[in-house]
Amino acid sequence: MWWYMILQASFGVFLKLHVLEGTKVRNGVKKAHKWVGMTFPIFGWVQMLFGVRPILRSKSLPEERLTPLRLGHPGYRFIGILFRRTLWTMFGS
């Protein structure tokens, strides 16, 4: 996801500096900046869902299979808690 943010920021800086006014390159960057901006929330929600997935799986796995999952994704509980709080904020408790 970090590359996506860097891409969006670099498009924004390019457009804000008004480089290459009226060229095809600038029009392409404007379209790309718009597309990346519109799909940014989708990528964020997918990241949150992938953070929740290990939490849901961890309740059905035996403890010995759960340990590699915890080591492989150390921030999964934090992401899952934020996802739940986001849903509660949006849709109520």
Image: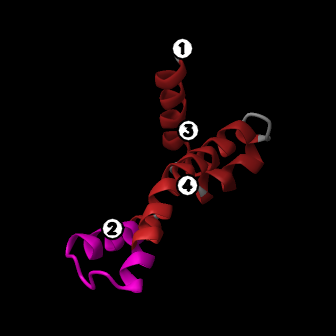
Q: Which circle, 1 or 4, is nearer the viewer?
A: 4
* Circles 4, 3 touching at the beta carbon (< 8 Å): no
- Residue assigned mark 3: 80
In front: label 4 or label 3: 4
Q: Are marks 2 and 4 in contact (CB under 8 Å)?
A: no
Q: Residue at x 63, y 49 (%)?
A: 50
Residue 22 sits in quarter: bottom left
Q: From mark 1 to mark 3, how far is it between C-alphas?
A: 16 Å
- Earlier sequence position, callout 4 versus callout 3: 4
- Amino acid type assigned to the residue bearing label 3 in the image: Gly
Q: Residue furthest left?
A: 17
The residue positioned 48% from the left and 36% from the top of the image is 82
Distance (Cα) linking label 1 and label 4: 25 Å
The numbered mark, 2 or 4, whose residue comes first in the sequence reads 2
Q: Which residue is mark 2?
A: 9
Residue 17: mark: none
Image quadrant containing the C terminus: top right
Q: Magenta stretch: residue 10 in it?
A: yes
Secondary structure, mark 1, is loop
Disc with the residue nearer the chain's start (1 vs 3): 3
Estimate how packed mark 4 is, as few (under 14), some (14 to 19) or many (20 or more) residues with alpha carbons within 10 Å: some
At label 4, the amino acid type is Phe
The residue singled out by tag 1 in the image is 93
Between marks 2 and 3, how big is the CA–CA gap? 27 Å
Amino acid type, label 2? Ala
The magenta region covers 6-29
Majority secondary structure of the magenta segment? helix
43 w.r.t. 84: above or below: below
Res 43 label? 4
Task: Measure how far apart labels 4 and 3 are at the Cα level.
Answer: 16 Å
